[in-house]
Image (cartoon, rainbow, N blue to C red):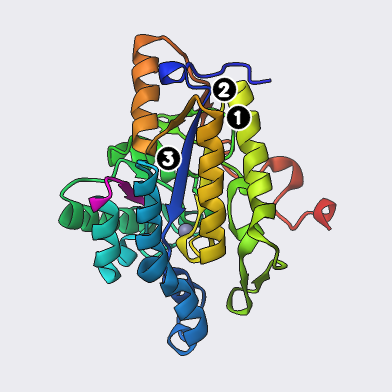
Amino acid sequence: MIANPVPWPNGARCAVAFTFDMDADSILHLAHHTSADTRLAAMSMLRYGPEIAVPRLVELYKRFDMHQTFFLPAWCMERYPAAVEAILQGGHEIAHHGYLHEHPNELPSEEELYWLQRGIDVFVAMTGERPRGFRAPTYKFSRHTLTHLVNESFVYDASLMGDDVPYLLENAAGRVVELPSHYALDDWPHFMASRDFNYFMSIKPPRQAMEVYAAEFDAMWEYGGLWIAVWHPFLSGRLARCVAIAELIEYMHKKGQVWFARLDEIAAYVQQLTQARTWVPRVDRLPYYPGPIPELGEAEPTLAR
Ligand SMILES: [Zn+2]
């Protein structure tokens, strides 16, 4: 089913990474710049992430002796230093998720680079090192993102959805490792309900989402894939959902032969295999298109109506 499965370390059948994007209230300021300060209920829902959920998740990982990856907009690191401290103390990785959760593919290239570098400065000041990984806010990876990541010495990206196993992104500037996921493993489609974001999924018991995540895991385990959860502390860190996550982790442990790892560890492993030519990843050349396809012309196409 997977043409080129990865020889995961120590005979593991698949690699598993629980990644949390701690967006906190950055997304509210971005969506409602002039009125975010008046939306206190939404603000409290989002602040639950760094204040309540992150310490809980760090405890949960400690119980299972797991080290995982958290993606943080740098502005959230500045606003919530206690959450940063808890994550680092737990032995987890913090990776780059924009400065204020800005959308790279809606910005000119220079502006995208400005926010990326401003975020890196915060990482260096607060963690003592540059970030190794990047996830574009809201998956909005631009046609210029890869060049900026290469020039800023990033090792991996985790924004795209093009495979079941790691692959390489390449352009004239160079390469980074891509660690892909997809929407079934994101928690917004399962749990997000907020009028302030005009996004209202129906409320369901957490186990229904866990069934989806477990089905994805079972397939990855069977065929040698990579399972990456794209979750958010303010959504999946809620109490009943956290209880369900603990059960999912137990299920994975019982099944066995699973490599639980931080994304920087998975990226380093992929680089090591690639250099030794033990395993040759697929290469995706970016951008896919230099601009809109010419067949539809400049005008708003009638085909799309
Ligand atoms: Zn995000």
Q: Residues within 10 Å of mark 1 (few under 14, many from 20)?
A: many
Whole-Å distance between the Cαs marked 3 and 1? Answer: 20 Å
Q: Which amino acid type is marked by label 3?
A: Asp
Q: Is residue 81 left or right of residue 139?
A: left
Assess whether residue 95 is covered by the magenta stretch: yes
Whole-Å distance between the Cαs marked 2 and 3? Answer: 20 Å
Q: Which amino acid type is marked by label 1?
A: Met
In the displayed structure, would residue 110 be above or below residue 26?
above
Assess whether residue 99 is covered by the magenta stretch: no
**The magenta segment:** 89-96
Q: Residue at x 46, y 79 (%)?
A: 43
Residue 238 screen position, x and y as percent: 51, 65
Q: Residue at x 38, y 44 (%)?
A: 68
Give 110 or 177, whichever is nearer the viewer: 177
Residue 157: mark in rendering: 3
Nearer to us: label 3 or label 1: 1
Q: Residues within 10 Å of mark 2 (few under 14, many from 20)?
A: many
Residue 115 screen position, x and y as percent: 33, 59
Which residue is identified by label 2?
224
The image quadrant where one finds the C terminus is bottom right
Q: Which tag, 2 or 3, sits closer to the chain's start?
A: 3
Q: Which amino acid type is marked by label 2?
A: Gly
In the displayed structure, would residue 146 be above or below residue 22?
above
Whole-Å distance between the Cαs marked 2 and 1? Answer: 5 Å
Which residue is identified by label 1?
220
Q: Residue at x 50, y 50 (%)?
A: 246
